[in-house]
């Protein structure tokens, strides 16, 4: 009966004088929301130290003005604590997502880094920093679009140090095949999904033949499973020289822990500075979003005293967070582009007196107005009734920022499990 009804309907549409209009107005993919889709999501918020409360405050203002479907559970965590409070870890495990300002790590002494603790406790094995030229922000190099993917849980950051005898300290660098293969697969999967052409493995296997040799061997093995993606390998010291002389040659870079920190901060400085580069840390179950590269500005007392800092990096990281939470609406994308334009203006002229001046309110209202207009355009594009709420994109409509989808695991989940 249903087949016959469909045939009759098809004949009616085919012979209808406006059949071409009727057919063209239909969406090719129908979005079927999951139960609870669109409901506001709780997000753990850690303002952190230094400029952290300033930039996270800016994000809260913008999120409120945009009526973003998230609400924050705020916790006070500081770098001089001995460990991350258990209630904070429980909140992140419950919410699955965290937005974090910088945490200052004491130099020397016996206090371990809370940033490292957080990554290990939640197994946030992949750090991703996207370093790219922002329109209107002049830099020495053009056409820079580098994605640094860094192994986050081992290497020199394992924290295995001890004093053998007075005056002699031994520090262990741990590299495992499991973690090396895992980060290599993540990098190649990321490149495949985002139509990136090349993955470069950064190493020092000419000196550390066993440790870095194992990392490089793992990358080579994974590369054979992705014949459509060019694989390159480069020694870390040569990599730094090539970065500052010709950064546009790099695409996706996969690195062990320490090298990734150095390469990401170098690339961020080349592309416009640490204050405008977004980033995030992702694991199998949890994700923490923060400023992509934080060298030098988290504990900058001058910025804190003047209440003057750059919120763009964390604003763009929060846009990554919204996509990770499957809120990639047209309005969010347009607001993100607005933030990208705002970054160049503020970097040149305002130096981001964003937090204490009335300009912050004006900016937030501007984003709110832009979001309303974008939603109206979004509705008209799909012939939606004017009173209908934002409709998420179809299951294969993967939204991007600067042509980039940031977290391949979650995109794969969306792609393959939308019908579950």
Image: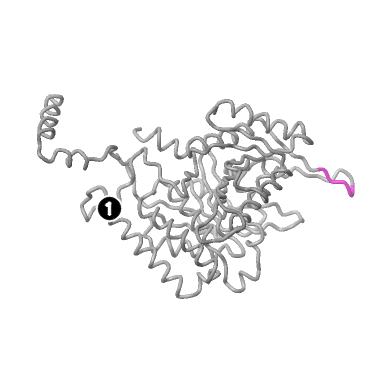
Describe residue 200's horizontal placement relative to residue 414 as left or right: right
Please tell me whether the stretch drawn in magenta is mainly helix, strand or loop: strand
Residue at image position (57%, 72%) is 307
Taking the image as drawn, is residue 123 in sight?
Answer: no
Residue at image position (62%, 60%) is 78
Q: How is the image coloured?
A: one colour
Residue at image position (46%, 61%) is 341
Tell me where residue 164 sits by quadrant. top right
Residue 316 pos. (x, y %): 49, 55
Tell me where residue 268 sits by quadrant. bottom right
The quadrant in which the N terminus is found is top left
Residue 242 pos. (x, y %): 68, 46
Q: Is residue 179 above or below residue 315?
A: above
Residue 14 pos. (x, y %): 13, 33
Magenta region, residue range:
166-170
Please give the residue where the numbered disc 1 appears in the rendered image: 389
Q: Identify which residue, 201 or 300, lies in the foreground.
A: 201
Taking the image as drawn, is residue 212 in sight?
Answer: yes
Number of marks: 1
Within the magenta stretch, is there residue 100? Answer: no
Q: Secondary structure at mark 1?
A: loop
Describe residue 143's horizontal placement relative to residue 418 as left or right: right
């Amino acid at each position: 009966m249903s087949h016959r009804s469909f045939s009759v309907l098809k004949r009616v549409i085919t012979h209808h004088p406006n059949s071409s209009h009727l057919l063209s107005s239909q969406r090719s993919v129908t979005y079927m929301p999951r139960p609870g889709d669109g409901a506001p999501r709780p997000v753990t918020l850690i303002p952190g130290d230094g400029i952290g409360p300033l930039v996270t405050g800016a994000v809260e203002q913008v999120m409120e003005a945009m009526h973003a479907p998230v609400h924050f559970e705020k916790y006070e965590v500081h770098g001089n604590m001995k460990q991350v409070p258990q209630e904070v870890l429980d909140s992140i495990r419950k919410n699955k997502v965290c937005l974090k300002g910088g945490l200052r790590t004491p130099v020397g002494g016996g206090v371990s880094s809370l940033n490292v603790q957080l990554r290990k406790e939640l197994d946030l094995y992949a750090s991703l920093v996207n370093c790219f030229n922002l329109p209107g922000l002049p830099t020495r190099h053009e056409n820079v679009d580098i994605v640094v993917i860094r192994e986050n849980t081992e290497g020199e950051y394992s924290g295995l140090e001890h004093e053998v005898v007075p005056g002699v300290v031994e520090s262990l660098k741990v590299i495992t095949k499991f973690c090396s293969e895992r980060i290599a697969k993540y990098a190649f999967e990321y490149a495949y999904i985002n139509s990136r052409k090349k993955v470069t493995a950064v190493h020092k296997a000419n000196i550390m033949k066993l440790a870095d040799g194992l990392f490089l061997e793992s990358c080579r093995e994974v590369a054979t499973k992705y014949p459509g993606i060019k694989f390159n390998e480069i020694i870390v010291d040569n990599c730094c020289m090539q970065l500052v002389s010709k950064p546009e040659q790099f695409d996706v870079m996969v690195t062990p822990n320490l090298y990734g920190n150095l390469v990401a901060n170098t690339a961020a400085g080349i592309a416009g500075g640490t204050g405008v580069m977004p980033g995030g840390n992702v694991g199998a179950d949890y994700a923490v979003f923060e400023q992509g590269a934080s060298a030098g500005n988290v504990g900058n007392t001058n910025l804190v005293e003047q209440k003057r800092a750059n919120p763009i990096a964390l604003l763009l990281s929060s846009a990554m967070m919204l996509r990770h939470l499957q809120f990639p609406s047209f309005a969010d994308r347009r607001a993100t582009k607005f933030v990208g334009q705002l970054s160049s203006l503020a970097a040149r002229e305002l130096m981001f007196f964003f937090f204490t001046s009335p300009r912050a309110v004006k900016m937030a209202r501007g984003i709110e107005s832009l979001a309303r207009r974008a939603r109206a355009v979004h509705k008209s594009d799909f012939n939606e009734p004017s009173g209908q709420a934002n409709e998420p994109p179809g299951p294969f409509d993967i939204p991007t920022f600067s042509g980039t989808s940031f977290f391949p695991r979650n995109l794969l989940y969306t792609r393959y499990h939308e019908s579950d």
